[in-house]
Amino acid sequence: MLSEVPSEVQQAVSAFLQTTTPSVVLKDFSFVSGGCINSAGRLKTTAGDFFLKWNLADKYPRMFESERKGLQHLRQPSVIDIPEVFTAGQAGTFQFILMELIAKAPVAKRYWEMLGERLAQLHRVTAARFGLDHDNYIGSLPQSNAQHDTWIEFFIHERLAPQLQLACNTRRIDPPWLRAFENLYPKLRSMLPDEKPALLHGDLWSGNLMVNEKGEPCLVDPAVYFGHREMEWAMTKLFGGFYEVFYSSYHLAYPLQPGYDDREDLYTLYPLLVHLNLFGASYKLSLDSILRKYS
Ligand code: ADP
């Protein structure tokens, strides 16, 4: 129901839509399930249907501004479907983002091959350094994208260390864990191959993967940065993985360096630490077993 959208957000969205459709009327709103953090759903208007998300601006400063920029980064090379963002901004105590509504069709036969091929193309988009020109969020946690010349320095200083510090500050882990990670860092330096920075979705799990109106893959809700593409693979595998044909199609289009399987767990340290910080101690077991495996 439209009344479930805060009136400040309704007014801001109307004002935006009026710039192109002077007598626009907002007609209806229905929540979608599956979101982790925000209120989100389908907004029906006389100017068409949209996808609208909002939250309290104080709680997650600039979250939708960084989502807008991230989606634009991913859309820019035109290799995979990414929703177009129409506007993002603040409305009273709320922030909101208004984007293209992805309308689902039956899944195309080559859906997973397409995803593999298109993600490989996305990963060929490169930059001078690892990181990004702005910080963003991973789930509801701030994610630093301060830039580094090498993947390993970026991975240690902008991915692992901040999450470890947060886990320590909130007493989810104790100091021996910090030492275990310190001991791991030289191994990471010798085990993780360098590569040129790749444009990553950054939070690619099944919940952020959609089917568009052609039945083809569409990516939403990113945590974009230029990183190592093996990080993206590891993220997809964390909770069971995608269909095998996705990985083989990707590999054919843009082969990974030999030995990825031996490195996969090391990349998952980051999403596991994020999950530890977001959802609690149950993720300690997986982290512990990886630390032991590489000690
Ligand atoms: P949150 O930021 O709260 O995690 P998401 O951006 O993941 O929210 O969106 C929640 C759900 O809404 C997604 O799992 C997906 O099913 C759906 N969704 C996301 N973006 C769109 C869109 N542009 N059009 C239609 N549905 C979308």
Image: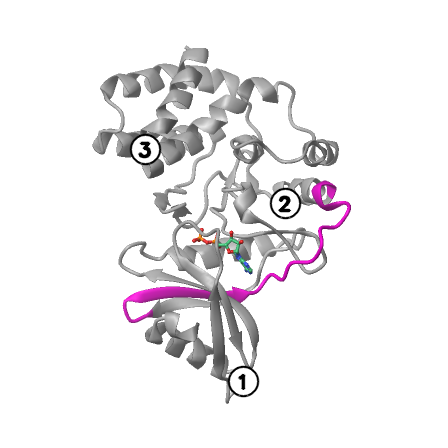
Give the spatial CA distance, label 1 vs label 2.
34 Å
> Which element type, helix, strand or loop, lies under badge 2?
helix
Kind of residue indicated by mark 1: Thr
Kind of residue indicated by mark 2: Leu
Q: Is residue 152 visible?
A: no
The percent coordinates of residue 84 (x first, y second) are 57, 63
Q: Is residue 235 magenta?
A: no
Kind of residue indicated by mark 3: Gly
Disc 1 to disc 3: CB gap under 8 Å: no
Residue at point 65%, 20% (across, down): 258
Q: Which residue is mark 2?
A: 122
Classify 33 as above or below 51.
above
Reading the chain from its start, which is encountered first: label 2 or label 3?
2
> Which element type, helix, strand or loop, lies under badge 1?
loop
Give the spatial CA distance, label 1 vs label 3.
47 Å
- In the picture, measured across the screen, residue 238 lies left or right of residue 260, that is left
**Which image quarter holds the N terminus?**
bottom left
Total residue callouts: 3
Q: Which residue is mark 1?
A: 21
Question: Residues in magenta?
Answer: 91-113
